Image (tube, rainbow, N blue to C red):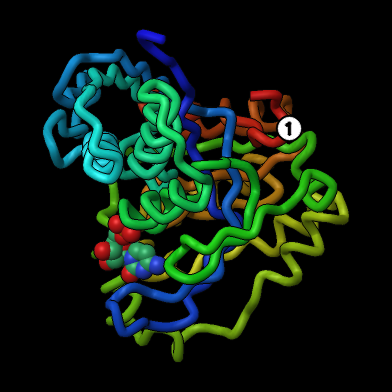
């Protein structure tokens, strides 16, 4: 095998509740993440040595700081690999958008190079390496729908029968063209009073709505602890969320630490309708996209 091409999907957080600050400086989370059929494309070419990457999207570093390059180096070190790779990354998800772009690219790199370099690593070995690369990376080793705890790296997959509400659903994604730095979002959350300043909630009602195939009930349970802090600095994001609901979305939420906001819709047709209203309101240069959930899109 000389090369391998894989999709690197994006996600949204349907629920993200911060439970507290940990001694390691991270925050303890309960979050429900769902992979989308919106994906970057990654091609991995076998090379005798070295790790290189090319990507034309602005804001994506093409050096050792790229999370995909770090994932490849981690594999080389762990397995004593001499072989290298050249990675061609076609970015389709907004950079720094709260949709897990870099984390997904890192997980896809682990999966692809495991095959290209013919490594005999167990799934749990990949999971350990993934969690060293970032809190969201393990989710993307098997992107589907999952409850994630700890830093986000403890994954409990949700089977298709238990998320029937997403079967026909679609999301309208709106990104303002800038990213929100994740460490800043968590710091601002803490500065506003942190856990003691927000209502107690858990993912139980959302998980029950997911299983009951009731999208309207699900839309009512969307929740993100980081929204107030991020909306305070970037009011345009709150305006997107409100506008998505006014345009007909059943519910709307900021994904992860932002800046992407999504509207949850009954189906693709409803989502296309919402998207055209958003474009009419904010102008066609705003980045918008309609996506389905990967678990039900055949992707
Ligand atoms: O793990 P990752 O590199 O994605 O995290 C980026 C930053 O987000 C961390 O350095 C930390 O500031 C914040 N974070 C956090 N608690 C989490 C996940 C991320 O405080 N559970």
> Does the closest atom of ligand 1 sit within 8 Å of the Cβ of label 1?
no
Q: Quadrant of residue 167?
A: top right
Q: Residue at x 57, y 59 (%)?
A: 155
Does any portion of residue 229 appear in the rendered image? yes
Q: Is residue 157 left or right of residue 65?
A: right
Q: Quadrant of residue 5?
A: top left
> Residue 267 location, x and y as percent?
75, 32
User: Ligand 1 quadrant?
Assistant: bottom left
Q: Nearer the viewer, residue 147 or 115?
A: 115
Residue at the far bottom: name it. Answer: 196
> Which residue lies under the disc numbered 1?
296
How many circles with numbers are drawn on the protein? 1
Please tell me how crowded label 1 is: few (under 14), some (14-19), or many (20+) other residues with Cα within 10 Å: some
Q: Is residue 262 left or right of residue 99?
A: right
Does any portion of residue 185 appear in the rendered image? no
Residue at the far top: name it. Answer: 2
> Residue 282 location, x and y as percent?
42, 34
Q: Residue at x 47, y 21 (%)?
A: 6
Q: Secondary structure at mark 1?
A: helix
Relative to 227, does residue 106 appear above or below in the rendering? Answer: above
Q: Residue at x 73, y 25 (%)?
A: 269
Q: Residue at x 37, y 44 (%)?
A: 103
> Residue 277 location, x and y as percent?
57, 31
The image quadrant where one finds the N terminus is top left
Relative to 242, does residue 55 appear above or below in the rendering? Answer: above
The image quadrant where one finds the C terminus is top right
> Residue 194 location, x and y as percent?
38, 83
């Amino acid at each position: 095998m000389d090369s391998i091409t894989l999709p690197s999907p994006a996600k949204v957080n349907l629920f993200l509740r911060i439970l507290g600050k940990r001694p390691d400086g991270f925050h303890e989370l309960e979050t429900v993440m769902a992979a989308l059929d919106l994906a970057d494309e990654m091609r991995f070419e076998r090379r005798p040595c070295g790790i290189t990457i090319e990507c034309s999207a602005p804001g994506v570093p093409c050096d050792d700081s790229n999370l995909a390059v770090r994932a490849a180096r981690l594999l080389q070190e762990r397995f004593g690999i001499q072989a290298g790779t050249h990675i061609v990354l076609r970015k389709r998800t907004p950079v720094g958008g709260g949709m897990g772009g870099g984390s997904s690219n890192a997980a896809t790199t682990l999966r692809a190079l495991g095959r290209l370099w013919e490594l005999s690593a167990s799934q749990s070995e990949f999971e350990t390496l993934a969690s060293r690369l970032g809190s969201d990376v393990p989710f993307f080793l098997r992107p589907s729908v999952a409850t994630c705890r700890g830093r986000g790296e403890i994954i409990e997959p949700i089977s298709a029968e238990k998320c029937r509400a997403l079967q026909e659903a679609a999301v309208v994604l709106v990104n303002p063209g800038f990213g929100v730095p994740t460490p800043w979002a968590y710091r601002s959350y803490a500065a506003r009073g942190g856990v003691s300043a927000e209502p107690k909630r858990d993912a139980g009602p959302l998980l029950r709505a997911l299983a009951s195939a009731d999208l309207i009930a699900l839309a009512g349970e969307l929740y993100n602890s980081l929204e107030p802090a991020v909306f305070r600095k970037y009011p345009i994001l709150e305006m997107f969320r409100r506008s998505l609901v006014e345009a007909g979305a059943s519910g709307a939420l900021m994904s992860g630490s932002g800046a992407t906001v999504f509207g949850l819709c009954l189906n693709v047709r409803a989502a296309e309708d919402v998207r055209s209203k958003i474009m009419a309101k904010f102008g066609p240069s705003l980045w918008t996209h309609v996506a389905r959930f990967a678990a039900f899109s055949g992707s």
